[in-house]
Image (cartoon, rainbow, N blue to C red):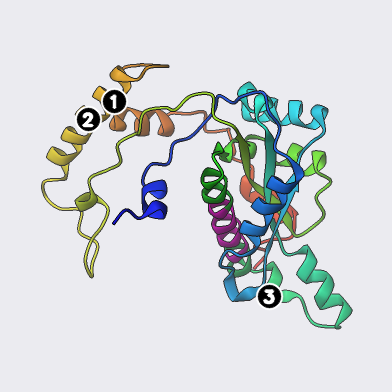
């Protein structure tokens, strides 16, 4: 018997080319509802979601990310790690907020954002929509903080561009399961080099056969390119996270 949820999850594609059609308020409410029913660490609900509808703000986010295609999306969310709300609860109840400033609580808010983000994407795809989760808003988190008027104890982590897909990209092959799923203990294995070469070849064929944006690249080349980027880019993340009040101890 076909499992529609499993089929959807294993056929996810990042969509960057959208029809010129905005999401309606009902769809946006449904997506927020899906996010709110995601698992949340200790039920502390340590995240917030900002719908960005102001054209000027969207244009500035586009410059930060380096992706002008996001301006054609039907809707844009920014997912925010948020302990500010719980800080206010602590203040109202005369409780020491020390724990909220810990690395533990920052990680908890990151987990909450990530899980809620995936719920939005899964829900969107079930509605016939598509999109891309964008970590590139971290190229200039201080500017994002200013654009969105984010208070202390909040931090922008991810953007989500959603809309009606204009095309259906080919499915990108993932790593062999044996190279990322282990039993009981981590064990990459002595034949990793051979398996990586095989996967590199598979990825190379995938890029060469794509109907759009074909190129010559392997997984290894992609990782090396990631590690070769400007060391200055995002080097201020930790300082800005701490300036927002997170991970001070």
Looking at marks 2 and 3 on the same chain, the residue that comes earlier in the sequence is marked by 3
Q: In which quadrant of the rendered view does residue 111 lie?
A: bottom right
Quadrant occupied by the C terminus: bottom right
Q: Quadrant of the N terminus?
A: bottom left
- 154 with respect to 35 (left or right): right
Q: Nearer the viewer, mark 1 or mark 3?
A: 1
SS at circle 2: helix
Asked whether, in this view, residue 187 is left or right of residue 223, the answer is left
State the CA–CA distance, disc 2 to disc 1.
6 Å
* Front in this rendered view, residue 135 or 48: 48
Q: Badges 2 and 3: C-beta atoms under 8 Å apart?
A: no
Residue at 27% x, 43% y: name it.
Answer: 175
Q: Please tell me which residue is depicted at 57% across the width and 40% down the height of the picture.
A: 135
The circle drawn on residue 99 is: 3
**SS for dot 1:** helix
Between the C-alphas of marks 1 and 3, the distance is 47 Å
User: Over which residues does the magenta segment extend?
Assistant: 108-119
Residue 206 is tagged as 1
Query: Which residue is at a point 56% across and 50% down the rendered structure image?
Result: 123
- Pointer 3 local density, CA inside 10 Å: few below 14, some 14–19, many at least 20: some
Q: Residue furthest front?
A: 1
Query: Does the magenta run of residues contain 118?
Result: yes
Relative side of 93 to 29, left or right = right
The residue at the point 22 percent across, 30 percent down is 202
In the image, 67 versus 247, the foreground residue is 67
Q: Could you tell me if the residues under marks 2 and 1 are in contact, i.e. CB atoms within 8 Å?
A: yes
User: In the rendered structure, which disc, 1 or 3, sits on the residue that comes first in sequence?
Assistant: 3
Instruction: Give the CA separation, mark 2 to mark 3.
Output: 47 Å
């Amino acid at each position: 018997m076909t499992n529609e949820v499993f089929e959807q999850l294993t056929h996810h594609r990042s969509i960057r080319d959208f029809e010129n059609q905005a999401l309606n308020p009902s769809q946006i409410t449904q997506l927020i509802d899906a996010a709110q029913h995601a698992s949340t660490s200790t039920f502390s609900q340590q995240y917030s979601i900002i719908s960005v509808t102001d054209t000027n703000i969207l244009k500035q986010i586009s410059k930060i990310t380096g992706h002008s295609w996001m301006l054609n999306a039907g809707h844009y969310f920014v997912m925010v790690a948020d302990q500010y709300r719980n800080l206010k609860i602590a203040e109202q109840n005369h409780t020491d907020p020390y724990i909220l400033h810990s690395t533990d609580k920052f990680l908890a808010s990151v987990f909450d954002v990530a899980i809620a983000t995936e719920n939005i994407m899964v829900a969107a795809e079930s509605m016939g929509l598509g999109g891309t989760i964008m970590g590139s808003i971290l190229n200039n988190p201080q500017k994002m903080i200013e654009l969105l008027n984010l208070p202390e104890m909040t931090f922008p982590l991810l953007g989500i561009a959603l809309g009606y897909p204009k095309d259906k990209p080919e499915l990108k092959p993932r790593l062999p399961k044996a190279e990322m799923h282990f039993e009981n203990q981590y064990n990459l294995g002595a034949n990793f080099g051979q398996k990586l070469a095989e996967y590199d070849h598979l990825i190379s064929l995938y890029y060469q056969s794509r109907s759009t944006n074909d190129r010559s690249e392997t997984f290894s080349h992609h990782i090396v390119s990631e590690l070769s980027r400007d060391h200055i880019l995002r080097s201020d993340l930790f300082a800005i996270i701490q300036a927002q009040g997170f991970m001070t101890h």
